[in-house]
Image: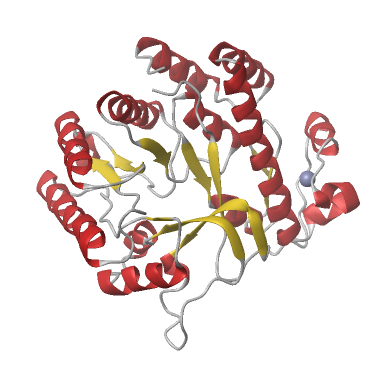
Amino acid sequence: MSLISKALLWIGEQDTPLKKDRLKDYVTDSVINYYNHKSKEPKLNYKPGKLLLDSGAFTAAMRGLELSRERVALIQEKLNPDLAVPLDYPLKPGMTLKTMQCSWEKTKENILYWQYNTKLSGKLMPTLHSWSNSSLNENLRWIYKHVDAEYIALGVIVNPSFTSFTGFFKDRQPTPEMLSNIHKAITLIKRETDFKVHIMGMGSSPLMLHFAYFMGADSTDSAGHRRKAAYGKIILPGMGERYVCNRTGRFSRKKLSLRELEILKECRCEVCRKNQALLYTDWRARAIHNEFVIKEEARKAKKLLASGFDVYEYYLDRIFSNSKHGLQYLWRHVKLLVKYAPIR
Ligand SMILES: [Zn+2]
């Protein structure tokens, strides 16, 4: 097993792209952005270096939409990605165990459909969902046996208590339980298979990104950095994110602390080099800044991992002791997980 994570980061892009030239980027996009373009052939409005194309299942599930499997597959074929995620059925809070099992059965059916009835076989990135230790084992074994793939994506990995979960469930909320589940899944995948692991949606904030790589993920994506920008958030290098304006982007600029301003001053992104004030008024400027920051973090992770796992740990110790985001307890939790059940 390779000891060094590739620390891949896929940048989120969409039909109205932030940048047209993406030839140097690993890009992730979703069928959901093309699904209703009924009048015309779906086509990309940018040029990606590599393209990971999601099915849009998670977004659809959150919005209560039903996607047609044939249409999703057709759009994926037309957009011709390097990796395609078959339409899956994400687990949702409040589902009974039986419903979760049914969802998984439908997901399996689709994975086979993608493998045998589309032009996307050989490019598949199947999604693993599980609701207990035994389903984690079984579902992983099923994918390994039936799917020809280099990467496996972690979908919703939860415990049976998920049936009574009533909280807000959208993006990955960092809790010790969620991190334990991810770590458990990565450990099992690395032990039992030769899949590389992609964690969906864990690269939108520097801290989560580092957690993913530190726990042994090979790849993640940052589809959320653009949405954050639209909501008035900027990402601070090595830290979390801060609101700098309200959604209309015109007033109520929130003040950053002196230390945060210092950190921001160091940013070498194209916006900050030319006119940092744009961060307060222009969401595109924030999106460009956020993308730059998150890419820098991934680059750093890759370099640190190449220098040795201890070096990476030391770096993260420093980051977390410096920051005021109150997430030190999560970092301690991650360290314990990795030390207790090392996969390297
Ligand atoms: Zn910047």
The one nearer the camera, 80 or 298, is 80
> For ligand 1, which image quadrant applies?
top right
The one nearer the camera, 265 or 82, is 82
Q: Quadrant of residue 282?
A: bottom right
Among all residues in the image, which is located at the extreme right? 274
Q: Quadrant of residue 343?
A: top left
Q: Is residue 264 visible?
A: yes
Q: Quadrant of residue 58?
A: bottom left
Question: Left of 215 or right of it: where is 227?
Answer: right
The percent coordinates of residue 302 (x first, y second) are 60, 29
Question: Left of 195 or right of it: where is 256?
Answer: right
Among all residues in the image, which is located at the extreme left? 98
Q: Which residue is rendered at x = 72% and y = 61% of the image?
A: 284
The one nearer the camera, 59 or 241, is 59
> Is 60 placed above or below 237 here?
below
- The N terminus lies in which quarter of the figure? top left
Q: Which residue is rendered at x = 69% and y = 41% of the image?
A: 293
The percent coordinates of residue 254 (x first, y second) are 75, 46
The percent coordinates of residue 270 (x first, y second) are 82, 51
Q: Is residue 245 visible?
A: no
Question: Left of 39 or right of it: where is 132?
Answer: left
- The C terminus lies in which quarter of the figure? top left
The percent coordinates of residue 313 (x first, y second) are 57, 15
Total marks placed: 0
Among all residues in the image, which is located at the extreme bottom? 39
